[in-house]
Image: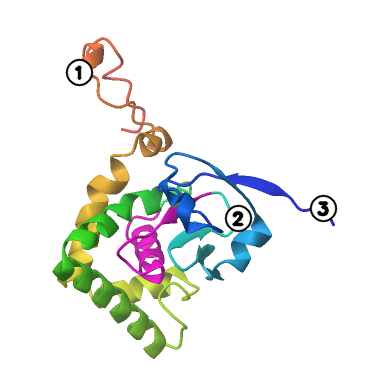
């Protein structure tokens, strides 16, 4: 049986076999899908959670997690998708939108406690409803119902508020939504189709 090797782009490099290579910034690691799956727990959402990383189960992307538990980061990624659902957005865009919470949690113990506690609360509500976890809840409508039970709490508001900028301020997202980006440095929109809106 032939084993397929894919290149896994890693935002903050992760060595899946040797932690000493984590200092090599910006490198790409070769990893078979089988190797990726054996190094982490595959969740129902298409995410693999390892000891210090989360990744797509198809090895399309991976992200190192420093302060938050990888399961918590997987919960944040799923939560981001459920709050601002876009079928044409890949999980990597949602992961990129919430990865700042890991950096903040590394410097702020109170913030870390709030995020970890909020993720555990989502899992507890999911278990009460007969699911294995929030991420393991199969139907989007069921996950949204879980989110509605905590929507007034600081945890939810922090994640939702961060997503407004974290998700929609990515140039890759702009391309998917048809936004051309800032026009100031190009002389403005006046001579560049300010009135070509076809959805009104």
Mark 1 residue crowding within 10 angstroms, few (<14) / some (14–19) / many (20+): few
Residue 62 appears left or right of 120 = right
Mark 3 residue crowding within 10 angstroms, few (<14) / some (14–19) / many (20+): few
**Residue at x 34% of width, y 60% of height:** 66
Report if the CB atoms under discs 1 and 2 are less than 8 Å apart.
no
Is 67 or 24 nearer to us in this picture?
24
Image position of 14 with respect to 174: above or below: below
Nearer the camera: disc 3 or disc 1? 3
Circle 2: element type: loop
Residue 111 appears left or right of 36 = left
**Residue 151 appears in the picture as rendered:** no
* Mark earlier in primary sequence (3, 2): 3
Choose top left, top right, bottom left or bottom right for residue 149.
bottom left
The residue carrying mark 3 is 2
**Residue at x 58% of width, y 53% of height:** 59
Indicate which disc residue 184 carries.
Answer: 1
User: Could you give the CA–CA distance between mark 3 and mark 1, rounded to whole angstroms?
Assistant: 52 Å
């Amino acid at each position: 049986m032939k084993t397929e090797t894919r290149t896994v782009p890693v935002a903050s490099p992760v060595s899946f076999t040797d932690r000493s290579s984590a200092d090599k910034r910006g490198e790409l690691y070769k990893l078979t899908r089988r190797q990726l799956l054996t190094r982490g727990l595959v969740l129902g959402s298409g995410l693999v959670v390892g000891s210090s990383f989360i990744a797509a189960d198809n090895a399309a992307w991976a992200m190192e997690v420093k302060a938050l538990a990888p399961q918590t980061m997987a919960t944040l990624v799923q939560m981001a998708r459920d709050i601002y659902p876009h079928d044409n957005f890949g999980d990597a865009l949602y992961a990129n939108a919430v990865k700042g919470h890991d950096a903040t949690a590394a410097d702020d113990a109170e913030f870390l406690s709030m995020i970890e506690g909020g993720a555990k609360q989502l899992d507890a509500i999911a278990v009460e409803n007969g699911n294995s976890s929030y991420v393991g809840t199969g139907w989007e409508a069921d996950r949204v119902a879980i989110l509605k039970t905590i929507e007034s709490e600081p945890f939810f508001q922090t994640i939702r508020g961060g997503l407004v900028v974290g998700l929609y301020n990515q140039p890759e997202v702009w391309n998917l939504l048809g936004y051309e980006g800032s026009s100031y440095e190009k002389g403005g929109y006046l001579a560049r189709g300010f009135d070509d809106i076809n959805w009104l």
